[in-house]
Image: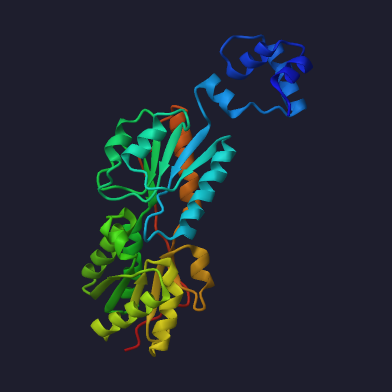
Amino acid sequence: MVKITDVARHAGVSPSTVSYALSGKRPISEETRRRVEDSIRALGYRPHAGARALASSKSNVLALVVPLRAGIHVPVVMEFAVSVVTTARAHDHDVLLLTQEEGEDGLRRVADTALVDALILMDVQLDDPRLPLLRSLERPSVMIGFPAEAEGLTCIDLDFRAAGELCVDHLAALGHRVVGLVGSPPEVYVRGTAFAQRVLQGFTAAADRHRLSSVVHPCEASPAAARAAAERLLREQPALTGVVVHNEPVLEPLIDTFEQLGLRVPGDLSVTAICPREQAESVRVPVTSVALPSTEIGTRAVELLMGKLGGEPVDEATLLPARLTVRASTAPRTA
């Protein structure tokens, strides 16, 4: 491993001069700085992270707070995480992943140390108990999700309310008059998770606007629960011809169940979803959907943090527009 003394010997300067060149704590001549930088490149020297943090008062580490609570769909969460890590590395930052239930005490423990420079928080609730602490922290933060009161915070997310409305608007335009929402697992609604609540708000508002009969059922993330949800929807609404799915694991089991119950998709039943584009395209009947842009959201969340760390003004609210892509799972109502 190349040491700072090796760089100093190669550049013909003292180790303290190399340290000053790295930290900027004392002025050195431009010619000396260039010699040190040339030696660092030639030898492949990388400053020790702890030493770099002590020298600059920065750790070059971001915390990604992703509490893996009940009802969370881990594959989608990991898409966000990979995007955050990849973008952070492009900005010469590492990511500390916190997957436990990090309430106020956990966040304060991390923020009060030199472990991280800034925080990204996921699984945001409408009435999130972490908000007072976030507003008081000196370290910058970005929330992937919008609480009910977002003033003074930096938030980014898909416009989930518009996503719910778009799905219903599309079904209404095809002539469907009775629609259902198969939503996230019940515990997600009990927590008041923001994205699920906003989809529900959008679905209900659009159904009311079009004067549709509508029904909403949360659904556990299992094939058995998908079957039970399908049977209950048809029992409660025998004239059902349109469904919106906001629950990635049950999308394909739901379509299979409806067809086992005698409803062809899209001949008898049109299905829309809010899910990753790749999933919508890979189902046996490609699904009309609003894509979940997890990669874009993760990337832009890091870029917002980089701007805040650099002292630049950033938008407090970034709401990505919902866009519906029509595929084979929807068709005009036939009866």
Can residue 237 be seen in the rendering of this structure?
no
- Compared to residue 271, the image places residue 111 above or below, namely above
**Closer to the camera in the image, 152 or 333:** 152
Please indicate, yes or no, whether residue 238 appears anywhere in the rendered image: yes
Question: Count of labels shown?
Answer: 0
Q: In the rendered image of this protein, does residue 106 appear above or below residue 144?
A: above
Which quadrant is home to the N terminus? top right
User: Residue 22 at what x, y percent from top left?
Assistant: 62, 19
Which residue is found at the position 40% from the left and 40% from the top? 142
**Residue 308 image-quadrant placement:** top left
Q: Nearer the viewer, residue 56 or 333?
A: 56
Considering only vertical position in the picture, is 186 above or below 88?
A: below
- x and y, in percent, of residue 80 in the image: 48, 51
- Applied colour scheme: rainbow
Classify residue 98 by image quadrant: top left
| Quarter of image, res 36 | top right
Q: Residue at x 34, y 49 (%)?
A: 124
Q: Name the residue: 46% across, 58% down.
A: 74
Q: Residue 160 location in percent, x, y?
A: 35, 57
Percent position (x, y) of residue 221? Answer: 39, 68
Q: Is residue 322 left or right of residue 85?
A: left
Q: Residue at x 72, y 17 (%)?
A: 5
Drawn side of residue 270 relative to residue 96, left or right:
left
Name the quadrant of the C terminus. Answer: bottom left
